[in-house]
Amino acid sequence: MPSPAAANNASSSASRTLWLLLALLVVAGLRLWRLPEAGPADYDSVRNWQVVQELAQGNFARLFHHGSPGFLLLYTPVAALTHQFLVFQAINAVLGLAGLGWFAAWVSWQAALRGPEAAGLVLLGGTSLLLTFSGRDFTMSSPSLVLAAGLLQSHFARLQRPSSRAALRVAAWLAVGLCFNYKFLFAVPILTVLEMCRADGLWQQRGLGARVLLVLAAPYVLFGTLGVAVGLPWYRWPGFYVRTVVPPAANVAGRQATLHLDLLYYVRYLLDFESPLLLLGLATAGWLGWRQWRGWRQWRLQPVALLPYLLAWAGCLLAGMSLLIKAPRGLLFAYLPLAALAVLSGRRLLPGWALTALILAAVGQNMYRIQRQLFAPLPARYPQVAAWLRQHEATQVASTVGLSLSPYLAKNQVLTVITDEQQLAALRRQGCQYVLLDGYWQVAGVAHFDSLRRQVPVAAWPNPQLQQPLLFLEHSEYTGLDYAQTLAASRAAVADSLPLRLYRLQ
């Protein structure tokens, strides 16, 4: 017969699980609400959708697009069954929820959170504006959250119970993560620093370092072999890293540098677009950690606590990303640890009712921002553009920088993206009938369409989605603009009441 303590633990665990599931349902509603009206908000989502379809048809030319072969191949079976962009969006949204739920369940179990505290963690992290935005697109962000949760859990377990098997498990999570998102490279220096601080003698085991390197190299060997088999150079995947770090030339927006020190970009973004509770939790956790700091030797000898562990990840990500060109997604792996720090530090200093009230207020503020930034601009007007083109029997169309029209076109309609209006002369000779002046050119900072803008369109539509500050900030990594310049560009775009303008090519 189970002891009373065991029965209480089982009851507490069941209650916590129920709270977690209820909170996840709320977040699921936010991620899926009006999703069919949203469509693709960015170029990368549509490009990924197109590449996955190419792979499903046996064309592997873009296997290493964005350095994410694992992500692309994950969705290739889906592309063999359907071409509906909404299906890919919905599956990706569910993956994002899985990453959130797994991370929250792990933190809740490690910290023995009560049910309402666990639900508060899910809601605070899940209603992040950036995670809601990226949870409704078709990029590698959502599956990356699943893999990041696995990496953090496995590494925390390795620090608690050092063994060669635990170290190899960490390496395996990191290797899989690199197949999906090159930003897992930024985890390498953080893991290295944490291992150096721990210094528990594990890495003195003979051959362990070599085995870890073999695990990390395995995906590059396997995918490199696949690439060679389909006619790609063996260095195509590592070459993506080189081009990312040292671009051979400036992009069409004029940005070439990859380093840009700005210590306030992410702080300003978190204050303006996310809950202030995230930064407050980071600062409070830092203060609590400082009070408990007992020196280097004690760090090596004592069991690793969850709060300083998450503090190390969040702090290192915030500091490290401040050295590079920036966009809110640069902190993708930090949002959930920041939410956890807010809950974990808050429960140390506040009574339960006060912490609950604080989290509810923060979640309410997040939902208000989600409504203004993501839901109020809906629906997207690209379906109306596509319907107009079908009605006028247009089969060849050009678009300025943006690809968001593509998922709504018929199979016999071809969309060509241009980055300069001078390309229109050649397209006209090739039979292109219309050009869509897509306001996405403002988002991407590609201002090469002055003559086209002065012409009279045959049709025009509003599309407030293209004028939201978050969308502009998400492209600041591409444009190279700083925080203030990016928001200024967003405000300038609002002056254009009809950002979707269709012109006949005579």
Image (spheres, grey):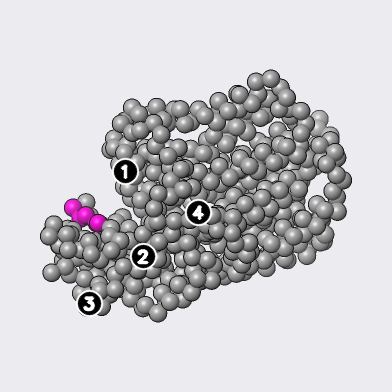
Residue under label 2? 446
Q: Nearer the viewer, mark 1 or mark 2?
A: 2
Circle 3: element type: loop
Circle 2: element type: loop
Along the line of sight, the residue nearer the viewer: 11 or 414: 414
What residue lies at 86% left-to-right and 53% top-to-bottom? 291
What residue lies at 57% left-to-right and 36% top-to-bottom? 174
Find the distance from the CA under tag 2 to the CA under tag 4: 18 Å
Circle 1: element type: helix
Residue under label 4? 258
Find the distance from the CA under tag 1 to the CA under tag 2: 27 Å
Task: Give the amino acid at mark 1.
Answer: Gln
Q: Residue furthest top?
A: 206
- Percent of width and height locating residue 248: 40, 49
Task: Give the amino acid at mark 3.
Answer: Gln
Find the distance from the CA under tag 3 to the CA under tag 1: 36 Å
Do callouts 2 and 4 mark residues in contact (Cβ within 8 Å)? no
Task: Give the amino acid at mark 4.
Answer: Thr
Counting residues from the start of the chain, the first of labels 1 and 4 encountered is 1
Q: Nearer the viewer, mark 2 or mark 4?
A: 4
